[in-house]
Amino acid sequence: MRSYYTPDQVREAEQPLLESLPAGVLMRRAAHGLATVVAAELLHRTDGVFGREVCVLVGSGDNGGDGLWAGALLRRRGAAVTAVLLNPERAHRDGLAAFRRAGGRVVATPGAPDIVIDAIVGISGQGALRPDAAALVAGISAPIVAADIPSGVDSVTGAVVGAAVRAQVTVAFGARKPAHVLAAPYCGRVEFVDIGLSLGDPFFESLSPFDVGSVWPIPTAEDDKYSQGVVGVLAGSDRYPGAALLCTGAAVAATSGMVRYVGSAATEVVSHYPEVVAARDLDAAGRVQAWVVGPGFGTGEDSRSRLMHVLGSDLPVVVDADALTILASSPESIRGRTAPTLLTPHAGEFERLAGSAPGPDRVRSVRALASEWGVAVLLKGRATVIADRGGRVLVSDAGGSAASTAGSGDVLSGLLGALVASGLDLLTAAACGTRVHSLAAATAAYGSGGELAAPISAGPLLAAVPEAIRIVRSGAV
């Protein structure tokens, strides 16, 4: 489990150390970690540190101090280090003195360094880069290592409202911040540096591949098809039979239990997946342990009636796509439902449900909807945000956009339904399903060297699900 903390939580954890340690110790710990990461990047990119050129972009306050102290350490290792002071009058005094003592030079422009350290704005900064800083950053072609948070990125929400640094590496001091996963494209690879903080409960968490693999349902010697979970799928229509195939196929691939399908695409589903037990209506469906409802389902009266029938049961339900559109006009049908319920909207569907768009603070918005409706909510995106009715949050970064294709959500809903039927709690099932879904997309789209081989559709994504499960089960991510 990976934990993320807000700036307020970090400052609270720093205070006892600031009171008990000599002045500047925490900053020098952070700077040492930053310098170590920069040196490793130089070795990787240029095969050396000695004689390589490093430029530090220095803002006011402690973040600039971190950068200056790191620059001093790199200079002692033989790098040629310069610093651009964006606000010379407010540059960190001790850090600047150490930088100059080590032989660092203050310059007006970065020049052509091998690597740049972004120490403009720290975790307390808000809003876009100021024009002078934005112009400076826009002219940089070298890789950037950000100190704690890329400047211009909101450390809590991950929001970017204007010019911001897009780093190749971000060095997290003492704790990972929410933006490190919510704004992953701006943070690049995140390297954690331990500076000795004792932290409490996190703001939110994310599951590692090992976490996912360790709880993914695998049959034991005592299991049969019923004990592993029977999921019922209400998906597809005459207009969208493919949704039924994708959703049902994902449920089949996810676990070793049993899948029942109800809908107009029964013949097509069974022809593709003969292990599925199909029925035309709910009365003939048979026993299930969870339902997934909505992909390609339609929004007419028959679809509404089927959805209400399922929601009236005491079984867990995963609600997606067209079923969310129906719910948006009938919220009373789900508010107060005591059985586990998971809503899986994209941003547009979320706006219809909540009455407003998620906005820049996606974690707060998802928490609020989950609490108000008494359900779990999974808001899809590059960083998928999942909250349960009690306020606990898990976030999953897809690592790329390979899954941004029509029908991808149908595959995800099938995975989620099967996992919920297996007995996993909603939050864990949602995080596990999301992680395997994004890994399957990457497995299908990327070559062995990590380069994008070709765009994919939902079909190859679904076909890669078993391999993605094998990867998280083996820990080989």
Image: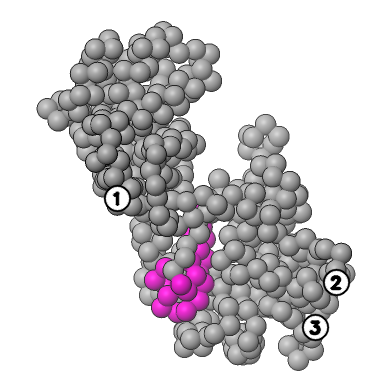
**Label 2, on which residue?**
224
89 or 165: nearer the eye?
A: 89
Q: Residue at x 47, y 65 (%)?
A: 392
Give, as a three-letter code, the residue at label 2.
Asp
Residue 427 horizontal/vertical position (percent)? 56, 66
Q: Is residue 269 magenta?
A: no
Q: Is residue 125 visible?
A: yes
Residue 271 horizontal/vertical position (percent)? 86, 69
**Disc 1 and disc 2: Cα gap in Å?**
51 Å
Residue 89 horizontal/vertical position (percent)? 12, 27
Q: Secondary structure at mark 2?
A: loop
**Label 1, on which residue?**
12
Residue 27 to residue 102: above or below: below
Q: Secondary structure at mark 3?
A: strand
Nearer the observer: mark 1 or 3; the answer is 1
Residue 230 to residue 127: above or below: below
Give, as a three-letter code, the residue at label 3.
Ala
Q: Residue at x 42, y 57 (%)?
A: 201
Q: Quadrant of residue 309?
A: bottom right
Q: Which residues are magenta?
A: 367-390
359 or 77: nearer the eye?
A: 77
Question: Within 10 Å of the Cα at label 3, are there few (<14), some (14-19), or many (20+) other Cα atoms?
Answer: some
Q: Quadrant of residue 143?
A: top left
- Lateral position of residue 248 relative to residue 349, left or right: right
View extreme (front): residue: 20
Question: Within 10 Å of the Cα at label 1, are there few (<14), some (14-19), or many (20+) other Cα atoms?
Answer: some
- Label number found at residue 279: 3
